[in-house]
Image (cartoon, rainbow, N blue to C red):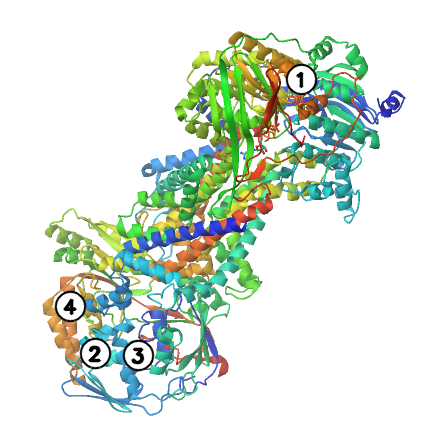
Amino acid sequence: QSLQDAKQGGSMIVTYKDDVSTLDPAIGYDWQNWSMIKSLFDGLMDYEPGTTELRNELSESHTISDDGKVFTFTLRDGPTFHNGRKITAEDVKYSLDRVTDPETKSPGAGFFAMIEGFDAQSAGEADGLSGVKVLDDRTVEITLTRPDATFLHVMALNFAMVVPKEAVEEFGDDFGKNPVGSGAFKLAEWTLGQRLVFEAYDDYWNEGLPKMEQITFEIGQEPVVALLRLQQGQADIPGDGIPPAQFLEVMNDPEQAKQVVEGGQLHTGYVTMNTQMPPFDNKQVRQAVNMAINKDRIVKVINGRAIPANQPLPPSMPGYAEDYEGYEFDPEKAKELLAEAGFPDGFETELFVYNTDPNPRIAQAIQQDLKAIGITAEIRSLAQANVIAAGGEKDQAPMIWSGGMGWIADFPDPSNFYGPILGCGGAVTGGWNWAWYCNEELDAKAAEADSIVDPARAEERQQMWREIYLQIMEDAPWAPVFHEQRFTIKSDQLGGPDEIFADPVHIPVHYDYVFSKNVQ
Amino acid sequence: MTDTPVASGPVPVRSRIVEVLSALMRRPRAAFGMAIIVIMVFAAVFAGWIMPHDPFEQSFDGLTLSGAPLPPNRQFWFGTDLLGRDLFSRLILGTRTSLIIGVVANGIAVIVGAGVGITAGYFGGWIGAILMRFTDLMMAFPALLLAIVLAAIFQPSLMIVALVIAMVNWVQMSRVIYTETRSLTERDFIQVQRSIGSGHVRIILRHLLPHLLSSIVVFGTLGISTTVLLEATLSYLGVGVRPPIPSWGNIIFENQTYFSTAPWLVFLPGAAIVLLALAFNLVGDALRDILDPTLKGRH
Amino acid sequence: MNAATDNAQGARRPVLTVRDLTVQVATTEGAMTVLDRLSFDLFAGETLCLAGESGSGKSMTALSIMGLLPKPMCRIAGGQIMLGDLDLTQLDDSGYRKIRSARIAMIFQEPMTSLNPVLRIGTQLQEVLLEHGQCTRRDAPQRALQLLRDVRLTEPERRLRQYPHELSGGMRQRVMIAMALACDPEILIADEPTTALDVTVQAEILDLIRALQAEHGTAVLMITHDMGVVAEMADRVIVLRHGVVEESAAVETLFAAPQTAYAQELLAAVPRLGHAPPRIAKPASESVLDVRDLVVNFDIRGGILNRPVARVHAVEGVSFSVARGETLALVGESGCGKSTIGKALLGLVPWQGSIKVAGREMSGLSARGLNEVRRDIQMVFQDPGASLDARMTVRDQVAEPLKVHGLSRGSELNDRVEWLFKRVGLTQDQLNRYPHEFSGGQRQRVCIARALALGPKIIVADESVSALDVSVQAQVLDLLRELQAEDGISYLFVSHDMAVIEQMADRVAVMRLGQIVEHGSREQVLQSPAHAYTRRLLAAVPVPDPQHQRPPKVIEAQDMPSPIRPLGDRPHRWPQTEVAPGHWAAMQEASV
Amino acid sequence: MASYILRRLLQSALILLGITLVTFVLLYLVPADPARQIAGRSATAETVANIRAQLGLDQPFFVQYWRYLTGLLQGDLGRSYLQRTEVSELVASRLPATLLLMAGAIACELALGLTIGIIAALKRNSRLDNGLMIFSFISISAPQFVVGILLLYVFAVKLGWFPIGGYGTFAHLVLPAVTLGFLGGGWYSRMMRSSMIDVLGQDFVRTARANGLSKWRIVLRHVLPNAILPIIAMIGIDIGLFMSGIVVVESVFGWPGIGQLAWQAIQRVDIPIIMGVTLVSATAIVLGNLLADLTAPLIDPRIKLK
Ligand SMILES: Nc1ncnc2c1ncn2[C@@H]1O[C@H](COP(=O)(O)OP(=O)(O)OP(=O)(O)O)[C@@H](O)[C@H]1O
Ligand SMILES: Nc1ncnc2c1ncn2[C@@H]1O[C@H](COP(=O)(O)OP(=O)(O)OP(=O)(O)O)[C@@H](O)[C@H]1O
Ligand SMILES: [Mg+2]
Ligand SMILES: [Mg+2]
């Protein structure tokens, strides 16, 4: 059954443990609401389903000026909001102004820093972004302060999605509970703490989509129970994935394993080492840690749900260095390095970790590996907020295991792994650069790479990023441990190509494209 | 009256403690409880000698190829945990933490609870009012929040978790004891003590306490299970013992989702907790029977 | 003499036959026989009294018949209890259930605790009726009401809806009787039904039992140690001692010519009003206790701020003094404030006024000072059961005051405790027992021993001999007098037994509603009572002589005038007039 | 009575004030900056400062607290930082489920606890009593998660008698309530046993027996009401416990109660939600205790409310 011919209709049930926090595209920023918002709203740009290739969405086409600073988008004629009103260029400007308005308190505002007038806007001194101009009903022109290769990715972020002014003004702060967008689905029901129901938007501009007539999100159930319900045919997708406890059981049962789709993820799990805190201010120590960690064993401990990592970028990310070998697992050599660095007997330190399974377990495995080279790491297993807070202080957390809070890319571009988490900008109090690594040379090189907007020079840009990350590996502020793989289990009734179920940006599935075999 | 007095004449003044202890040992159930307690204390103190494996060793052959823990077998009597460590050794080492929590911390909570309850009930008046409102306040106190704050501010340690438990767990006890003390204080025999000139401390310890023993035993032993499990929650939030140090509670807590695939990881530490609580209950019940003469001969 | 007794002399079959009843209790030292081959018959319509010293096994007999011996400590070791053709000792629990209340009913010693505190009177009555199929559910309330009328409770409709604690002791005892009579039983067992009550109420209850017995023809097994009650109630008497029958005879025979030595001793010990030996008037000495204008109020709180809204005027302006070696008796109806005075003297309740003990003013004393004073004044509490700690051996409890004040320790302490025990007539082997292993009277002796421990100058004895049988009572009274003679101890002697008072007191104060209404020397008050209430009190005293019987006059139980008053409404203090030198009385009081 | 309630409510208001203060202090001490969490990774320091100012987090402690209190008096619990929803709405949406589960759980606890406690007291020191004691300790020591899933597996998945989690009908309520009842029943049964034994030794029980009442009548009508008082005090305490949420059972059964909300908020340091939930559960505890104190005189008329 090919995707194109699949008939529309049918329904499915997705379960989640945690509450859906908000469906406001300017605010929602967790992996749960990220793809829900994608189905409710549309932006100017998007990705081809199941891939990381950009494509036009609400815009019919776009042009980039030669200096790479002016982007002109032409809107499609036809798309309407769920309230029936046609989308105009004004809406695009309103949406961008809104997300950057400090009143909105959007966690994504910083992504738009390259747009002209952003500084004034975020300081609350302007009436909108001066760089965003409405040329006519269907044309928007956006001017940047510097050429930026990632800009089109930024326009594909949820934060850039188009919202209708009248609805935002009507609902005010509660817009996130009463979203009105232009996506393939519209919100039909939201019972707090229990369920959300999405219904297909009949007037969706993209003919033939969505496939499902209705999606119900059921909230508040333990993943273990969600799996039971799936097995009983009462749910179609456990949104939180296969619970670690049941993973082997599922995979060892051919019947169930058949229903599992495996895919890569733009994810890296790593240990940060605070380069400002002794003894991690010593490069050799950091390198020793890199050599001490037995990544294969850790992958085994999490039942092979990941592949070992040797660099910050995940394999499917452009710029990934295929031929780079990384630090190999060699406790002996690690010990030598430590001795060279002046710690023949090792030292004591702390390893911070977010307290949800399997992170404390992974931390314990790392702990044992470090023990083998003489480093005694006390584990501090804390609530997420506390770990983040500790990482943001210069002298709090010598080591942090990133699991559970780690970097899943916002968009598939190598630059996304640098800025706030490895660049100097993030190495400030309250920042996200927990390694407190700041290499100004690399910062300059990163800026240079990002100013290459010409698609023809993409290869060159990737090369530059590769060099940046290899230099980082040389300095070793991180010890990359693994890249998580995604395993999505689905019910028999769901149809669609495997990529849909392992979409790199839509987690767990690309809701618009899943169809029901029941109605075929 | 054909009274058959066996021992008339002065009774030798024996140490009360020895007397109670020997009375305990004469009851099979209490002796059984004592034995369990002794064994557990022994295990806690001499863990280093008893443990068959290194409890922290994530041994290579402790996991299957696909990374599953091993069920009980000849090498690992109680099986292994998710990191391939020997569960039996971890349980033995965990006895330390769990005894400190379940017995010491819970014991402190019991003492504080009983203390506050008795004081409030015995003195009444504004002292009682203040103490009881304070109890109400503590009852509504967000303990988990306190845990998070402490976790972030202090270095986590067993002391802190014991402190938190002692701080939050005395409340129920105090309320129940308060009510009982209130009615006991009204009774004549306490009035008599006051008329004799007994001090407050003497009245409380010698005359009120024995009457409250039965509630204290009930709450104290029930508290063992709850605090041992509470420790796991608190450790999870980062106040308590740090991995890889085991405690019965955190072994259960870490592994509870695995109970269908690796039941030994949940049921064995669970059994240890039940056994500990049961042992204290058996001893406590017997103690109460011994100290409560009205129940004598009723078993 | 009533008609039923005459019938009993005929050859009628007894309703209850007890043969060779032996009861044992388990103690730490092994089984102990408390009833030894006891045999007697009970005939329809007659009243059989079980008399005898405290601890002789009277209550055990009653409990054996009811099948209520506390299990598993006590057991029937042999013998038969025949109810008609039925051997009760062979019955199982469900068999017994059909007998209890339906054929044999019992009134217990303590009316205060024998009713379920959480159920209404009506409910408890109806329950019994329904359980034994005495009436239909529809008729039950009506029958219950009738029962309350039968026992002459005032306002029976209201009582049905009340809870036990809302009734006075006398009323509760009437309810107990109503309950016992609910199923018209053949046999009624009454275990000291009036010990806890004051004389006037006692007279009412006894009259009531007699009247009901006449109406229903019930056989009554009455247990008492009060020979006055025996004389007034019994047709036949069995005297028990140490679990064996000493003497069994018709009441007239027994009183006229007791056969056994024990019975003779018992009867000789009976205090008789007007027969007390004259007391030698003591030379006026310094007063040990001096009370001026004592007021004890209990606030009843309420309202949002928990302010006092009303006040119990338990003691209202009482003044008296007790000289060294003197005994002042306090009499008065239940609830008039006698015990409260005692508690105030020991600083157990807040009070106003002035109390001087051995010349030291009590008000404003620190805790330490108060303890000093307490060595000079001690109290024997009214309820011996409640005033002993159930979790402590009596040895420890008697030793407690000595330890508290650090007076003696070690073997000296032991000797002292043993000496105290001996003095109150208890034996060595009882030292290490717990309170519940004693009979009521034995407990009272323990309490006296405890009060004596500190060697006080004055003892407040609150109904201290009420639960003692006459012989022991006489012993204890002798003891008290002996102490007085030797050490010059003074007593504030609270009692309702006029005969005892006559024996003990130098002076008597009669109380009513928190005030003293009459006050004078023993002879003045008892022989020429000036106040109407005193006269009524004296009239209610049972006379230990079967020939002398008061005509039954059943009085209805009434609510007492209440000492509770709204704030600011002080009770009127009755002015006193001196009717004779040293004899004061409140004269113009209408509501007597 | 009315004035008693009023007085207690006044006191309760003070306690609640105390609780808000303590909670506020604690939250003030938590080293996690809500502004940073709101601002996200891409934010600059200025943006964060800006947000902090908007939320008033840059104000001194007492100003913040005063603001919260004045808001509270106007019925404004504030807005969740991370969910951006009115806290009152979030709490209100979960309150019915919590109350329902609480009622169900207490009913189960009582049913189980009283039955076991009574039987154990009547048959004390028998083999049955021992068995029941072991059962009680197992039930107290059992992890909620395991009990919940086992029940779910047996009664919902295998036997199909009940739905696999969810909320709505009576059938949904049964399993979570039974799970909690199983756990709490252990407590109640031990307490019940000990207080039953006390009451069984009292005089009026002897009177009832002397009146020939049947065994069960004595137990149920005479002993039970006298023995149940400590249990009632316990229920008061329990209400509070349940109101602050039973996270594990809620998430096993997908029950939309307050516990999950609270747990998530605590993990994320979402201050307004934590404050709101704490306030609600504190209120429940205070009311629960009041309720227990008000019930006591209905059962034991000797108890006077003072
Ligand atoms: N549980 C017990 N253990 C040991 N001895 C007991 C126990 N109960 C009662 N006795 C003893 O049994 C004897 C008879 O007691 P019982 O209560 O029948 O006396 P009584 O004649 O009713 O005395 P009183 O007039 O004081 O009530 C007493 O010597 C008492 O000490
Ligand atoms: N703590 C108290 N609070 C309130 N009222 C009390 C208190 N103690 C005693 N009373 C009341 O004070 C009055 C006097 O009581 P008290 O015990 O002194 O009487 P009594 O003369 O000893 O009676 P009895 O002969 O029955 O022992 C009674 O009405 C009683 O209800
Ligand atoms: Mg008796
Ligand atoms: Mg009195």
Q: Is residue B217 above or below residue C224?
A: below
Same subunit under labels 1 and 3? no
For mark 4, what is the residue? Answer: A470
For mark 1, what is the residue? Answer: C526
Kind of residue indicated by mark 2: Ala
In which chain is the residue bearing label 2? A
State the separation of the CA atoms marked 4 and 3.
Answer: 26 Å
* Mark 4 residue crowding within 10 angstroms, few (<14) / some (14–19) / many (20+): some
Q: Is label 2 in a helix, a strand or a loop?
A: loop
Q: Is mark 3 within 8 Å of ligand 2?
A: no
Between marks 4 and 2 in the image, the one whose residue lies nearer the viewer: 2
For mark 3, what is the residue? Answer: A51
Q: Is residue A200 above or below residue C423?
A: below
Q: Is label 3 in a helix, a strand or a loop?
A: loop
For mark 2, what is the residue? Answer: A126
State the separation of the CA atoms marked 2 and 1.
Answer: 107 Å
Q: Say whether residue D145 is visible.
A: no
Q: Nearer the viewer, residue B276 or C408?
A: C408
Q: Nearer the viewer, residue C396 or C312?
A: C312
Q: Is label 4 in a helix, a strand or a loop?
A: helix
Marks 3 and 2 close (CB-CB < 8 Å): no
In which chain is the residue bearing label 3? A
The location of residue B233, given as percent across then percent down, is 38, 51
State the separation of the CA atoms marked 3 and 2.
Answer: 38 Å
Between marks 1 and 3 in the image, the one whose residue lies nearer the viewer: 1
Kind of residue indicated by mark 1: Leu
Q: Earlier in the sequence, mark 4 or mark 2?
A: 2
Q: Residue C542 occupies which quadrant of the picture?
A: top right
